[in-house]
Amino acid sequence: MDLNSASTIVLQVLTQATSQDTAVLKPAEEQLKQWETQPGFYSVLLNIFTNHSLDVNVRWLAVLYFKNGIDRYWRRVAPHALSEEEKTTLRAGLITNFNEPVNQIATQISVLIAKVARVDCPRQWPELIPTLLESVKVQDDLRQHRALLTFYHVTKTLASKRLAADRKLFYDLASGIYSFACSLWNHHTDTFLQQVCAGDEAAATNSLERTLLSLKVLRKLTVHGFVEPHWSAEVMGFLHAVFERLKQFLECNSSPETLEAHKIKTAFFTYPTLMEICRRLVTHYFLLTKEELMMWEEDPEGFTVEETGGDSWKYSLRPCTEVLFIDIFHEYNQTLTPVLLEMVHSLQGSTNMEDTSAILIKDAVYNAVGLAAYELFDSVDFDQWFKNQLLAELQVSHNRYKPIRRRVIWLIGQWISVKFKSDLRPMLYEAIRNLLQDQDLVVRIETATTLKLTVDDFEFSTDQFLPYLESMFTLLFQLLQEVTQCDTKMHVLHVLSCVIERVNMQIRPYVGCLVQYLPLLWKQSEEHNMLRCAILTTLIHLVQGLGADSKNLYPFLLPVIQLSTDVSQPPHVYLLEDGLELWLVTLENSPCLTPELLRIFQNMSALLELSSENLKNCFKIINAYIFLSSSEFLQMYAADLCQSFCELLEDITTEGQVQVLKVVENVLKVNPVLGPQMFQPLLPSIFRGILDGERYPVVMSTYLGIVGRILLQNASFFSLLLNQMACELGQELDQILGNMIEMWVDRMDNITQPERRKLSALALLSLLPSLNSVIQDKFCGIINISVEGLHDVMTEDPETGTYKDCMLMSHFEEPKVTEDEEPPTEQDKRKKILALKDPVHTVSLQQFIYEKLKAQQELLGEQGFQALMETVDTEIVAQLQEFLQGF
């Protein structure tokens, strides 16, 4: 298509295509459709939509046609793919000027640049990111905004790619541009704050938009650009800066009332006033009262419940003063830190056991240091304080010193995630073990809380903790038995759960006593649903820790699951969410399907009818049954499930539809012979969805995955389905088959999962060899998908220079698990074994293509086969030959 002569014609047809008159509109649309595959058409469109003097509606339409063309013709292996020469020209033209004046068109241009980047960046388009980085620095407001908008959409698109190689590229990109993105955000934030304070609303609005765009870029880079963001100094610096900028936004309101209030606040909060407030709050209002001390003696559990937020505590004076202290210390920390540290230093050394007042003062000061832990980070060497002072105080066993023992172990809990060296943890574990044997119940309960905070911390090491595991677990269990109040039992159970979760399989030798006690506790807690929720949480972690051995718990475990997930039972209102989670982990860790485990599934029908937020876990449970024992499960429940799914699909979100379809896909994976028959009522609507060009890519991808499985693994049933569709739609069988293949080829880019992409190639290739004219007519598309599949799965051996299919699996290996990884569940192992029977992992795509082409050649003869191959693009043929070298 000659650009000069074609531009006028294309412009005229685009103008007609914006008409409201269908007599003008329809022929124009038809003409544009014919031009879609013409070389040079997209270069003409680029010239049109970048010409700001043309009608906005015409330019808008040109952008849309260009964007749709990227989806269909940009990939090298697509039918009628754009030439590499034209793509090079288009890429250069797209980033020449970021000066689009119309917002809607600018957004579309940014999106289509991102679509090209998804395919070509960085290998075929290395200049894109550097160009964007330079363009967001320019002084021109419009160009800067448009470049930043494009930068965001490109980052968002690249972050969404999930193949390992693509993720590695994005990690590299993120590490290379993160500092720049941070500086960009800082610059626009500074500008925005200055403009707000100056009262320039119009300029501030523009700067705020740039601030938000750069913040969105940083969000994508932070979440998707680092394997472990918390280990990156740049990321943590940015997150810290976010909160600092928030403390600035709040202060930037420059109304006269605010300025006057600031003057009053400054005049009142002088150094002497602040110092007096700090001392008074700590030494007067933080003190334990006589009533509290009496309650500690007479009802230690009641005292503990009140201290952790009981009704009386909520309305007492001390929590209010603690909140006031935190707010003032945060606002004036530079002024008040020396005051608080001086109070700490004055209390060093031993305390007279007869001086109750001195003990209570020390308790109050230590309370303040714990509340202000984050503010005191740079001012307190907590590790030294712990070793030189606090550890010794924990060892003072005098009864009158119990407020300090309790306060010190609480204080350590507040600092554990702020500043505490990991090599000090064994010393802390020794202290915790000793305190769990303390004569005072309040001290033991507080110690359990600090243990939970310690094992919950991200620096927790299982290896460091293992020498103390048996004794800690025994002491916690004794504490659980000793306490009597529901709230306290819940609290201790949560600590036990946390320990079990962190040490996982290492807990197995020590859980016998707890396993025997939980049925009794469950029975006793019949009127206390929240305690039962805590028991369910403990059971979840127990099952995960016990793995296949959790089968021994079934006499207690399965009735608990049955009750918790039965919507006809009143307690389900409280227990359902945790009950479903327990049901799921039980299935995932089950070594085999028992009759009792199978019977519980009777609860599922009513759960699916609820269509609640728990639906996702319901689908996970269904999948777990399928992987556990598909034959027994499906024979009993397939009909009910199919009926439930048919009803669900009529009134469910797109995400919900995908979850239903994935269940069907899993059934076909594990049982390709009987699966299609069992879910036959669902299949016509899936087939129609493909023929109609389902508009949601994820749904379309799953549709194609399901039909691909049937076509590849149950060809006879596929023929029956095809005949059924021909009867229902009143069309020729070959016409439906041709339409299906055409839509499959057209929507191949909807499929992002590598397994499904390979499956598509295998499924369509399984139609060969064939004399069917429709299949031969679609031969080019089948080969295109096959070559695209080869690009997805083939890796080159650098030593031999040959290609191999990276998805092939030859045998099952027990994965090696590091300390930070969860051990594989029984379900993980089942999925691995299933993969060894899956054509996606057992059939070489390379060899399959070769064998199918060879068979087609033998069927047609050399001349007929060559004529068929001539329908395929020469570049695709060359790529195919390269992959098939050696065959």
Image (spheres, rainbow, N blue to C red):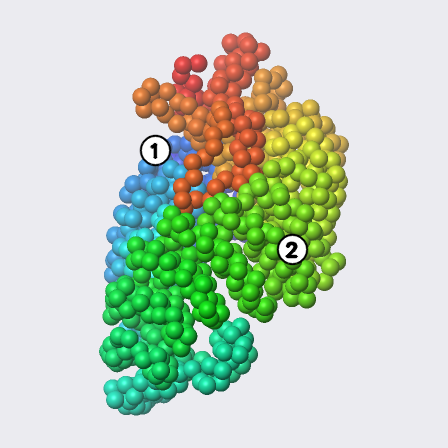
The Cα–Cα distance between marks 1 and 2, rounded to whole angstroms, is: 73 Å
Residue at 28 percent across and 75 percent down: it is 350
Residue 196's x, y, as percent?
A: 32, 75
* Residue identifier under label 2: 519
Residue 244's x, y, as percent?
A: 32, 69
Q: Earlier in the sequence, mark 1 or mark 2?
A: 1
Q: Tell me which amino acid carries mark 1.
A: Glu
Which is more toward the observer, 95 or 155?
155
Is 259 situated above or below 512? below
Residue 362's x, y, as percent?
A: 33, 78
Q: Report the side of 886 relative to 388 (left or right).
A: right
Which is more toward the observer, 523 or 89?
523
Residue 743's x, y, as percent?
A: 58, 35
Q: Residues within 10 Å of mark 2 (few under 14, many from 20)?
A: some
Residue at 58 percent across and 19 percent down: it is 768
Residue at 55 percent across and 15 percent down: it is 856
Which is more toward the observer, 424 or 583?
424
Is 623 situated above or below 387? above
Q: Nearer the viewer, mark 1 or mark 2?
A: 2
* Residue identifier under label 1: 85
